[in-house]
Amino acid sequence: MNATINLENKHFPVLLNELISIISPLYGGTFIDCTFGQGGYSEKILENKKNDIIALDRDNDVLFKASKLKKKYNSRFKFYNIKFSQLDKIKLKDNKLKGIIFDLGYSLNQIKNSQKGLSFLDKGKLNMKMGINDISANEIISNMDENNLIKVFKIFGDESYSKKIVREIVKKRKEQNIKTEDLVQIIDSVKKYQKTKIHNSTKVFQALRILVNKEISELINALINSFRLIPIGGIIAVVTFHSIEDRIVKFFFKHYSEQRNSSRYLPEAEVSERCFKLINKKPILPSESEIKQNPPSRSAKLRYGIKTNDKCDFTEFREKFKNLTDVENLR
C-alpha cells in the first residue's frame, strides 16, 4: 500500500540515493516531481543551487509543506495542485528539463489521515479520495452493480474470494451504510480460514483505491505526457509498489526501447526508432539496509528510461491495458 514510511512513523523517500544517482542533479537543471507528497525527492534535489523543481500533487493536504519549500527556495520551486496526468498543462520557459520522477506510493500523512480512509485500520466512512476525485469508496460500495464490483476486486486486487465478499456486501448494504470497519468485518468473515502473510483486507482496499483514484488511466496518461514534455536526453523515472502499476511501467519502457513498427496499423516498411535507451533492463530494488530501516519499501521497484526520439506512437500502449481502463470506467 505504501512504502515511504517505517514502523517508527518517520517519512522516508524510497530509493532516494538510487534515484539521485540516476537523474544526476549535480549538473543542474529543471526536474519535475510528479508525486510531491512530503517533498523528500524535491528537497534533496533543491540542495544544489543549480536545480529547479516543479512539483505536482493532487492532494491539497500537501499545500503546507509546499508553501514551506516555496518560502525557502523562492523561484527555484513551483507547485501545482493538479493530477500528474495533467503534465501537459505545465509551460516550461526554457529547455532545461532534465528529469521527470514519480513515486507511486502513499505518504505517512495520507495513511494516518483517517478522513481519507486509505487504511483498513481506520474506522468510519469509506473515502479513499486523494483529491480532485469524482467518486468515493463509499459510493462504490453502496451503489456499484454486483457483477462490476466482483470485476473490480478480482482484476485490481487479484482477490480470489471476490464473489463471496461482494455477495456479503450486497446483503449488508441493504440494511445499512457500510463503513470501513464493516467492510473489514465482512472480508474477515469470508476469509476467516485463510492463512496468509498479508491482512485479509489488503487486496480489496487496494482495488478500491485504484478505482476511486483512477490510478491506471492516470499513470498511463502521465507516462505519455511525460514523454511528450521531456526533451531528448531527459530521464523519466518511476517507483512502483504493486504488480499492476509495475507491469504498466515495465511495458512502457521495455516495449518502446526496442526497434519495431511505430504502429501495428502502419506498413511493415515504416519502422520507428527506439523511444528510450535503457541502462538497467531490470528494476532497481531497495538495499537490505533500506528495507531494514523502512520495511514497507521491500515492494518498491525503480525503473527509468532516457528519451532518444521525439516521435513515438502510444496506440499499442493504450491498447495493451485497455482491459484495465475499461474496468475503471465501470464506476
Image: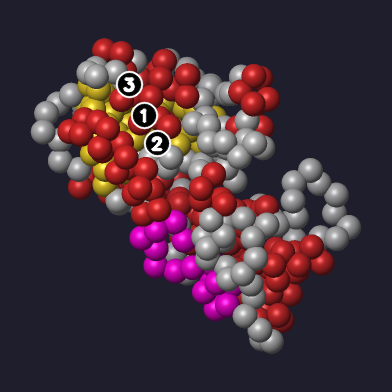
- Dominant secondary-structure state across the stretch colored magenta: loop
Give residue 119's position: percent from left, percent from top: 62, 55
Q: Is residue 293 left or right of residue 105?
A: right
Q: Tag 2's secondary structure?
A: loop
Residue 48 falls in which quadrant of the image?
top left
The span from disc 2 to disc 1 (Cα, nearest Å) is: 6 Å
In space, the residues marked 3 and 2 are separated at their CA atoms by 12 Å
Residue located beneath label 1 in the image: 43
Query: Against 250, is 217 above or below?
Result: below
Classify 10 Å Cα crowding around label 1: few (below 14), some (14-19), many (20 and above): some
Res. 302 mark: none
Find the magenta span and give its range.
Answer: 128-145
Among numbered discs 3 and 2, the one appearing first in the sequence: 2
Number of the label disc, if any, that sits on residue 47: 3
Q: Residue at x 85, y 49 (%)?
A: 195
| Secondary element at image label 1 | helix
Disc 2 marks which amino acid?
A: Gly
Which circle marks residue 39 in the picture? 2
At mark 3, the secondary structure is: loop
Name which quarter of the figure residue 4 lies in: top right
Answer whether labels 2 and 1 touch (C-beta < 8 Å): yes
Q: Nearer the viewer, residue 219 or 239?
A: 239
Q: Position of residue 211 (x, y in %)?
A: 50, 60
Residue shown at the point (20%, 43%) measured from the top left: 90
Q: Is residue 139 magenta?
A: yes
Of residues 276 and 122, which is closer to you in this image?
122
Taking depth in this image into account, of 296 and 259 the one nearest to the observer is 296
Mark 3 vs 1: CB contact within 8 A: yes
